[in-house]
Amino acid sequence: MKKVNRHLAIIAAGFMMTAAVPADTINPDTNRTKLNPRLYGKTLKTSKQTVKIALLLDTSNSMDGLINQAKAQLWDIVNQFTHAKCGDATRPKLEIALYQYGNDKLSAQEGYVQQVLGFSSDLDEISEKLFSLSTNGGEEYCGQVIQTSLKQLDWGKNPDNLKMIFIAGNEPFDQGRLAYKAAVLNAMEKDVVVNTIFCGNYEEGIHTYWKDGATLTGGEYMAIDHNRQVVHISTPYDDIIIKLNGNLNKTYVSYGALGAAKQYQQSAQDDNAMEMEEAVAVKRAVSKSSSLYTNESWDLIDASEKPDFNLSKIEKNQLPAELKGKSNPEIEAFINAKKSERGRIQKEIQSLNAKREAFILENQKDVTKGELENAMLEAIKKQAAKKAFSWE
């Protein structure tokens, strides 16, 4: 975590930057017939089912193990979704929101509940927010945090979307003034499934209403050992994947007012993963090689894939130094070269990961996966089937 403070300071500075720059003076018609029309605003309509997951984590004193599991296993869950398919054979979009509750540092007036992150598909941001969590004793009001997440988040009304809450904690589910039954019934009205994860003995969770909180919406009740150490199996492919991740980072071209800050955020989350364990860094690298890792808001290469991207409208002062003074054809050639290089590296990581997973399967013991990961994936796959999702 030593490197993170330095990165976060730079990120904070980046967010204060302004974007006041002169208009682009490039003639949008110059050499247009020679340029890729994909980079000049060609519209393509896409429609994807979305998986919306709100993760509600108890951050009271006894929950350090739970938070560490969440940090370590985020990438396992993301990587599982790279194999998911919608009913029309397209890949779903994944959005994750994060809440903490039961922490004395939070507002008592708000029921010791805080939205840490609204629905986001920015994997670096999700990782950063997870690593920002710390524990402190408090009052755990499950009904309150469920109700708050239902009110604050944009769950949408698409009946084909998979909308899920995962709430994890270890105190009775019925604590607090807001009745959990009212909260979960509200979830049903929004087509949101509530899944409960009790951190402790399975029977105790039943007696303290965690199972009831799940079954009312057709969700899953699970009990885990949140203090269990996650066992990662090292493989001969780990070092190579980590080196390729470094090369992958070099294909990102930051632009715009927040570009530099977001690129530092990317690097900071690489550091966070590595400081946890090398295997976590490998799993993050695999996630970054997938279609779920997109950064069109600050990376010129990802931005060029957007249907409404128009190269002629990019203001030159928003570009990195290496592209300033370049013509549109030169910038296009640069984008295409970086895109090709990235695709090659991502394919190599995916190929090595297939070998890595085969190695793990051959060498793993009876129980090697993390408790939180197992609980979530079991529920996700079961409930996703009802929305015509499948896994390869």
Image: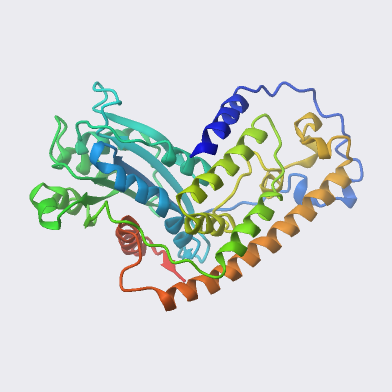
Residue nearest the viewer, comparing 151 with 61: 61
In percent of width and height, residue 126 lies at 47, 42
The image shows a total of numbered marks equal to 0
> For the point 71% across and 50% down, which residue is it?
251
> For the point 39% across and 34% down, which residue is it?
116
> For the point 45% across and 65% down, which residue is it?
87
- Residue lying farthest front? 2
- Residue lying farthest bottom? 362
In percent of width and height, residue 310 lies at 75, 41
> For the point 11% across and 53% down, which residue is it?
206
Residue 231 lies in what quarter of the image? bottom left
Q: Is residue 3 left or right of residue 347?
A: left
Question: Is residue 141 something one can see in this rendering?
Answer: yes
In percent of width and height, residue 48 lies at 51, 54
Question: Is residue 122 something one can see in this rendering?
Answer: no
Q: How is the image coloured?
A: rainbow
Residue nearest the viewer, comparing 231 with 186: 231
